[in-house]
Amino acid sequence: MSDEEIQDVIVVGAGLSGLTAAISLQQRGYSVRVLERRPVAGGLCGSTTIDGYQFTLGSNDFGSAIKRYLQQLGVDLEFEQNQTVFYCGREKYVLPATSRTVFDLLRHLPDTTRVGRALRNPDIGNKFDYVGQFLDATVRNKTFRDFLSLPSYVAGHSPAAHRFDLFRQIYSKNPDYGYHELCAPADGPQAITDAMTARFAELGGRIEFDTDVLDVRQTDDGKLVTTSQGTYRTKHLVSSEARTGNHSVRSSLEIGVLHIATRPDVPFPAGVHTVGYLPSGVQNWLGQLDDGVLPDQFGFHAFPCVTTEEYRSFNAYFYYPRGVEEFDSRTLATVEEYILKELARLIPGFGSRVLFRRSVSPAQFKKEHNLRRVSIEDILPLGVEKPSVHDKETDTYYVGNTVGPVAYHACAAMYAALDAADQLASANPLA
Ligand SMILES: Cc1cc2nc3c(=O)[nH]c(=O)nc-3n(C[C@H](O)[C@H](O)[C@H](O)COP(=O)(O)OP(=O)(O)OC[C@H]3O[C@@H](n4cnc5c(N)ncnc54)[C@H](O)[C@@H]3O)c2cc1C
């Protein structure tokens, strides 16, 4: 199919960032068309159904800034604020910090003081290039060191390779993504992109599904976009594809998912979204994974996806060793047993309620969901920052996690998309 009508804006991708830019521009009066290669919107923010059980696809817990961004877009959605619980060895850390957590941290007062100084004082902090160096020099207590490795675990990098300036920026309030008070819609992340898709349609925007953008050429009056379904013409282009630069990128470890369905009466703690387990020696086992080796003990985290009258579903995320995209059946069985055994230990009664389980490897994930890029966080070389949203050479506005300010999560992706929409609108005002 070819569409001769020239659009004001074509947006490549109907994930969180593409939809954010599309709604923002449609709100300002631009005619926007979104082209999406998959049959559904949402990208990594959606759900999937396996054997009749519904599971979350990727992102699941969001910084509170998402509520502000959605309000700005006219998207009305209720969020619940939940706790995260991480077990580090024999210690339990609850986030956001409760009075109990603060009390527990007092046990590590000398370490907490040194860490606070290094995070606040650039003269100290700037001495460290990588999180591993900072932890080794600053934190004496091994369990507390494990807990402070949590940002590296979440980023999918060994502390030895995780840039310390990025770690420090997590604690910065600029931009304030609100990841210190996590929230999620009660019905799961699919509700976010469903509400955004409905809002975009209400504003008169159109999404073409099963439409893979293959090539973009500059023409006299704009751009010619070639897709698997034909060509489109547009004055401006917004893309949620990765903006690649001249620098090498160190991708995160690839994530594996163990989907678990249990009976609905599973005793998962109320008010908690994520339960995580970091066995002792986080630097060591993350390092082994980074070296391509599966350690005997490794961390994982689990969270509920949906609750129905018949079942509750959960995802447990864990990392595959670097370079490994698929386990042989014996290794996979060992990994699944390990996760289920630890979950049953952390949540008494969990194990006896399991009805179904299926793991999805990084290779299967990409194949089944046609999502080609599943790095949790890319690390650029020291001193190099992510590029800005506007590529002057091709006059393309990029959105998502490869551009814009620090961090690789849903709120950073949406922030970049709002920035791209602002920049496009101010450089190209409607006549
Ligand atoms: C396993 C996992 C868990 C995560 N958990 C969290 C979390 O809990 N909280 C959080 O804040 N963040 C989380 N993230 C990060 C979050 O998912 C991303 O930041 C966010 O989804 C990025 O949105 P996006 O729209 O930029 O990209 P995507 O979600 O990847 O969407 C891009 C869309 O563009 C489409 N597309 C790309 N190229 C083309 C093309 N050429 N033609 C047509 N369509 C195209 C794709 O099909 C896709 O639908 C997680 C990431 C992963 C991988």
Image (cartoon, rainbow, N blue to C red):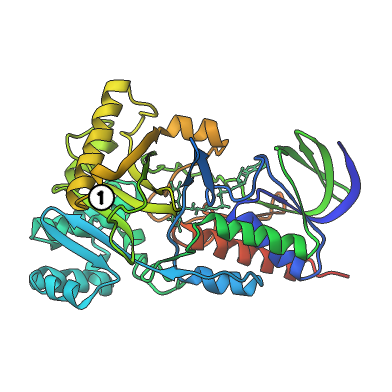
Instruction: Bin the neighbour count of mark 1 within 10 Å (Cα to Cα): few under 14, some 14-19, many 20 and up.
Output: many
Q: Quadrant of residue 209?
A: top right
The residue at 47%/30% (across/down) is 364
Q: Position of residue 238 (x, y in %)?
A: 69, 54
Of 412 and 262, nearer the camera is 262
- Quadrant including the C terminus: bottom right
**Residue that carries the numbered disc 1 in the rendered image:** 159
Q: Position of residue 200 (x, y in %)?
A: 72, 61
Furthest residue toward front: 309
- Give the amino acid at mark 1: Pro
Q: Is residue 108 left or right of residue 16?
A: left
Q: Position of residue 40 (x, y in %)?
A: 65, 45
Q: Position of residue 169 (x, y in %)?
A: 37, 66
Q: Is residue 106 left or right of residue 181?
A: left
Of 364 and 125, nearer the camera is 364
The residue at 33%/67% (across/down) is 271
Q: Secondary structure at mark 1?
A: loop
